[in-house]
Amino acid sequence: MRSLRHAAVALASLLAAAASAEARDICWIDRVERTTAGVRVFFSEPRVVFIRGAARSGAFDVDQSKPEGGLSDRQIPRAKSVEATPGDQLRTDNNHDGCTLTFRMEGNVAGLWVENWYMPPPTAGVPMKPGQQTKFIPAQK
């Protein structure tokens, strides 16, 4: 019984680590955590994140290394993470890459449907074609 419990704990840890690693591979996402109302998104580097939803719209300067609250240098609210709930769509980009993140349930699993577009850097001076990918990132519990 004890070894079965250890195996279950090890499997849960492995799945959480895999979900976190999967999240880091796209859209500057560090991790996605489940909340009562939806999911909370943490980014691996500072981002301006725009939120559009039925209940709210606005922008946040998201940076895990800065204190929560107040206004950033950009004069928008500062946060360590942002929450997405049903009906919300988040958007973040830089000059040549960007993402749209939409709260989604897949079966009983809450997460983000991510649409990412990017422009790879030139290789040997030859411009590369723009890329696009979509994926579902499940929330960690």
Image (tube, helix red, strand yellow):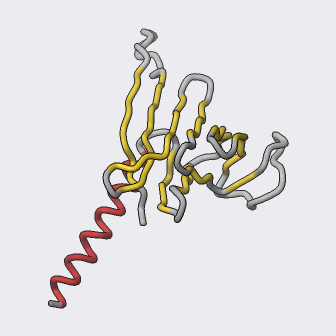
Q: Residue shown at 29%/65% (left/top)?
A: 14
* 122, above or below 64, in the image: above
The extreme bottom residue here reads: 2
Would residue 122 be found to the left or right of residue 77 on screen?
left
Would residue 113 be found to the left or right of residue 107 on screen?
right
* 31, above or below 49, in the image: below
x, y percentage for residue 141? 42, 66
x, y percentage for residue 135? 36, 38
* 83, above or below 73, in the image: below
Q: Residue shown at 54%/60% (left/top)?
A: 37
Would residue 47 be found to the left or right of residue 134 on screen?
right
Q: Residue shown at 59%/53% (left/top)?
A: 83
Question: Which sits in the foreground, 77 or 65?
Answer: 77
x, y percentage for residue 10? 26, 74
Question: Which sits in the foreground, 96 or 53?
Answer: 53
Question: Which sits in the foreground, 138 or 44?
Answer: 138
